[in-house]
Image: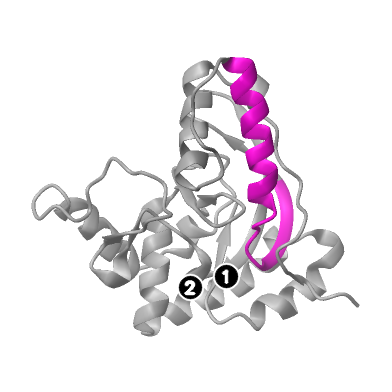
């Protein structure tokens, strides 16, 4: 039987670009510029779409190792809905905007976030939120199949850059890093969730592969 853990390889690239307005396209282009996959985010709509498509293909080739799950719909704040794929990955492979394990140091490859986690005053409530999640992780919120990004698994790029659920991603990294009882809570719940989020045609392999992971996290 082929292993359920997939190395970085070809993946299906979601193409929702034609439905985006110019501002959304420039935001997506800006993310790809920050990731070093585009030289700039200039151009008209047609040019941006062509450039982003090419950059996304290159990004997909950087797919982090993990266990592929089933597909689902994700509802965006704009009202649009896109297809996503659930995936079980190692916590250390995620790239949130900041690293809670290093006093919330910004991740150079992370997505830009308007929340200044390092600011002594303004960042305090954001840091407290991450610590709150890490101190009492609730699997029902981290492993739900809600169609929005407000709760549930973090939303990430193929290369692991966190786009939604930043605090949830940081908190899970912190929990596994500290290695306390909360880590076992998340690990056990994530293993239990494989039956819900795995590809139904490969559940057996997926369960074995996730069980062998050091710090499994569910993303989409």
23 and 87: which is toward the camera: 23
Asked whether the beta carbons under mark 2 and mark 1 sit within 8 Å of each other, the answer is yes
44 and 83: which is toward the camera: 44
In the rendered image, residue 144, in percent from the top left (x then y), is placed at 55, 54
Residue 194 is left or right of residue 164, and the answer is right
In the rendered image, residue 123, in percent from the top left (x then y), is placed at 17, 51
- Outermost front residue: 39
The residue segment tinted magenta is 45-71
Q: Which residue is mark 2?
A: 186
Q: Which mark is residue 190?
A: 1
75 w.r.t. 188: above or below: above
The figure's colour scheme reads one colour
Q: Quadrant of residue 5?
A: bottom right
Residue at position x 66%, y 67% in the image: 66
Q: Secondary structure at mark 1?
A: helix
Separation of marks 2 and 1 at Cα, in angstroms: 6 Å
Q: Which mark is residue 73?
A: none
Is residue 19 at least partly visible in the picture? no
57 w.r.t. 25: above or below: below
Q: Secondary structure at mark 2?
A: helix
In the rendered image, residue 156, in percent from the top left (x then y), is placed at 54, 51
């Amino acid at each position: 039987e082929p292993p359920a853990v997939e190395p970085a390889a070809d993946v299906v690239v979601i193409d929702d670009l034609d439905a985006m307005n110019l501002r959304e396209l420039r935001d997506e282009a800006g993310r790809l510029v920050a990731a070093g996959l585009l030289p700039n985010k200039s151009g008209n709509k047609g040019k941006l779409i062509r450039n982003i498509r090419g950059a996304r293909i290159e990004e997909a080739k950087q797919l982090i190792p993990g266990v592929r799950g089933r597909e689902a719909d994700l509802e965006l704040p704009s009202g649009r809905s896109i297809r996503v794929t659930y995936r079980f990955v190692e916590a250390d492979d995620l790239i949130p905007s900041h690293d809670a394990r290093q006093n919330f140091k910004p991740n150079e490859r992370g997505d830009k976030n308007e929340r200044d986690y390092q600011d002594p005053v303004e960042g305090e409530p954001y840091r407290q939120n991450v610590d709150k999640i890490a101190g009492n992780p609730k699997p029902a919120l981290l492993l739900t199949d809600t169609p929005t990004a407000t709760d549930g698994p973090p939303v990430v790029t193929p290369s692991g850059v966190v786009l939604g659920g930043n605090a949830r991603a940081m908190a899970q990294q912190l929990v596994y890093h500290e290695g306390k009882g909360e880590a076992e809570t998340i690990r056990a719940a994530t293993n239990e969730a494989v039956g819900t989020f795995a590809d139904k045609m490969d559940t057996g392999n997926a369960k074995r592969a996730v069980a062998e992971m050091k710090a499994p996290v569910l993303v989409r």
